Image (cartoon, rainbow, N blue to C red):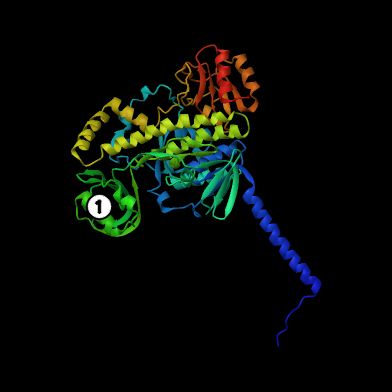
Amino acid sequence: MSRLYKPDAGAFRNFVFQSFYMKETLESRKSAQNHSIHDVIISGAGPVGLFLACELALAKCSVLILEKAENPHSPLKQLPFGIRGLSAPTIEALYRRGLLKELEIHKRLKNPHQNAQQGAQRQGGHFAGIPFHDGNIDTSQWKYRLPRSTDTSLISEMEELETVLARRAEALGVEIKRGLAITDFHQTGDGVTVQSGDRSFKGKWLVGCDGSRSVVRKAGGFEFAGTEPEFTGYSTQVDITDPEKLSPGRNVTPTGMYLQSQPGYVIIQDFDGGAFHHSEKPVTLEHVQEVLRRVSNTDVTISALHIATTWTDRARQATTYRNGRVFLAGDAAHIHAPLGGQGLNLGLGDAMNLGWKLAATIQEKAPEDLLDTYHTERHPLGAQVLDWSRSQAAIMGPGPNARALNAIIRDLMDTRDGATYIAGRVWGVHSHYNLGGDHPLVGHSIPNFELEDGAGIGELMHDGKGMLLDFDMHASLKTLAGEYGDRIKYISGRAKEQLGLSSALIRPDGFIAWASDREPNEQSIRQAAALWFAR
């Protein structure tokens, strides 16, 4: 016979009290956690959101990232789908934060477009599928790139890049919550309350880095203006019964384009005006086979479909990157065809530009109107990339007009000046901001000068501080830097190659705010310092 245990009345009261207390404490902790005020809440834990978080946390801001995906790993981020080309500004940004050395994939992989033929020129990239080669580029035209400069282009992998950035962000104290998508938000004059289902979080600022279908952009009422697509693109991993029926490499046909970069991985462009992508129909084996047969003009047979995703050349951009206490960055602010991987580079540039400005504002080291320069500097670069994408789509089409333009561009790119121009645009060598000033370097990325002790300028920027570089050791500049405390580091001494420069004021993102080839004009340097590092 079983025995029923009955606690005495006192023990039962204690048990009930302890249970209630524990429940209340857990709920209080949960409520406190949900309503603690972060300096910045970021929607999206992709490369852009993570890099922005790193920049903010480096400046001692408290950051919360909310990411809708529970698992950061995805087949579309892995080889070869996840391969991206990093441009010069991105490489410089990662180098200046000590992150470039952590990326290993560019050391293991050759450029997938590289011609393996013995003695052939290395392909440096393409414009609308038309290749340009390193040997045809006149780097002497880029007079501010020094021998110690970082590479102009590197291969990266999305998954590795995200892993490296997430590891750095967490080491800096960033809180990343996965499986929580922002569903709505409400902003006031002093903060933003974010909803994720039945949970809420409070921050002083909110940044939407949540991709092309950004909830932050939609809920924030941002206008997203642009043009509609010409084609539906397909990125697929398939088993092909008769792969010999497809030509290797990129093939333009009367009905579209297909690319077989390696066996089993096929990219297709079908000039249907983006109809299939917008239909949101499932991508089936039968559909991919029909499109591939039509575009390739073969009867090729697909026996298995492992991965498939669609995309378009739809090009849209937010008309403003800021609405009160809410910002957009990356694909949330601009979308275009993923031709040449410029979207990733553009988004990481957004993060580098916004991070130090937002941190300085939060810490009251700069007036709030500094934040307006994020839009004025980044929006024109975004518009340029969108036009670059549109121009590629215009000459990739199957019609006679597009083919005629394609032939002319191909001829121009086969010249030394043509290849140099295209490479400079693809690699971002000419990227700069219109900051005014009399010196031609103002608004450009600081060259990686090598000081006499062997240190490179980029290596001195790991802490994210501004810098006053003084090759000629002017006493007035040292005094000025001292007035700004830890906001401006004073670096003096000769460099092995100075490009005629005497001194320069460098923003935390590595762009030159002021420069001089001679004795500095104290009024102009003080004006520049006050503008970017207001005391």
Task: From the viewer's side, name the closer residue of 237 and 68.
Answer: 68
Local SS, label 1: helix
Q: Quadrant of the N terminus?
A: bottom right
Q: Residues within 10 Å of mark 1 (few under 14, many from 20)?
A: many
Query: Which residue shows up at 64% across the image and 51% down it?
Result: 33
> Residue 146 appears at what percent x and percent y?
44, 24
Task: From the viewer's side, name the closer residue of 325 and 145.
Answer: 325
Q: Is residue 243 visible?
A: no
Q: Residue beneath label 1, please?
A: 292
Task: From the viewer's side, name the closer residue of 207 and 58.
Answer: 207
On screen, 420 above or below 309? above
Residue type for callout 1: Leu
On screen, 520 above or below 7? above
Task: From the viewer's side, name the closer residue of 210 and 3.
Answer: 210
> Residue 518 appears at what percent x and percent y?
52, 12
Q: Quadrant of residue 280?
A: bottom left
> Residue 166 appears at what percent x and percent y?
53, 45
Query: Which residue shows up at 47% across the image and 38% down it?
Result: 348
Q: Quadrant of residue 6?
A: bottom right
